[in-house]
Image (cartoon, rainbow, N blue to C red):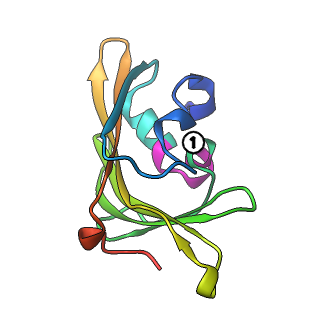
Amino acid sequence: MRTTRLARFGDVGNPWVAYDEPVSDERVTRTVVLPAEPDEVWATLTTPEELSAWLGEVVALELEPGGSLVVRENEGPTRRGVVEAADPGRILSFRWRRLAGAGVSLEVGGASRVTFVLEADPAGTRLTVTEEPVPLATAGFGA
């Protein structure tokens, strides 16, 4: 089996996912066709070592609805989230928010939903990534 690394796809990295920016009121969607089969792309999205190339240091990823996601940015804040959908080769969706500091100095960022949709394409896999704000009243996770 060939290993597909996200980093080798160049333009498909971190610009799709907001980090230190406040969550805007707008949905952001990007689509790219990757020269790999959907199962290969799925494997890179769901292997913590590979997903780290996009998101930061992934320290926990439970690939089932309700599963947890924890991403630590280089010696900085942590993002905590919950997996909403994980359908192998088709869709990965999670809600997350940024947490920085601790105790009374804890800063909680706005919540957003990130969705990766994979579709077969004659040239490989069409990957669509969407990030959209999630109202705090329904965010369901955080501090």
The question of residue 49 being in magenta is answered with yes
Q: Is residue 46 magenta?
A: yes
Q: Residue at x 53, y 48 (%)?
A: 21
The spot of residue 34 in percent (x, y) is 44, 21
Is 115 located above or below residue 95 in the figure?
A: above
The magenta stretch is 45-52
Q: Could you tell whether 134 is left or right of 76 in the image?
A: left
- Report the quarter where the N terminus lies: top right
Quarter of the figure with residue 85: bottom left
- Mark 1 nearby-residue class (10 Å; few <14, some 14–19, many ≥20): some
**Image location of residue 68, percent across then percent down:** 43, 70
Judge left or right: residue 135 versus residue 106.
Answer: left
**Residue pictured at 37% horizontal, 28% vertical:** 30
Disc 1 element:
helix
> Measured along the vertical axis of the image, is residue 39 above or below residue 22?
above
The foreground one among 88 and 14 is: 14
Number of marks in the image?
1
Per the picture, the main secondary structure of the magenta-coloured stretch is helix
Residue 3 seen in render: no
How far from the left and from the top, in percent, is residue 116?
35, 41
Residue 73 seen from this side: yes
The three-letter code of the residue at mark 1 reads Trp
Identify residue for label 1.
54
**Residue at 63% across / 51% down in the picture?**
56
Determine the image quadrant of residue 58: bottom right
Residue at position x 41%, y 41% from top? 42
Between 54 and 136, the one nearer to me in the picture: 136
**Residue 105's quadrant in the figure?**
bottom right
Single out the residue that lies furthest toward the top.
122
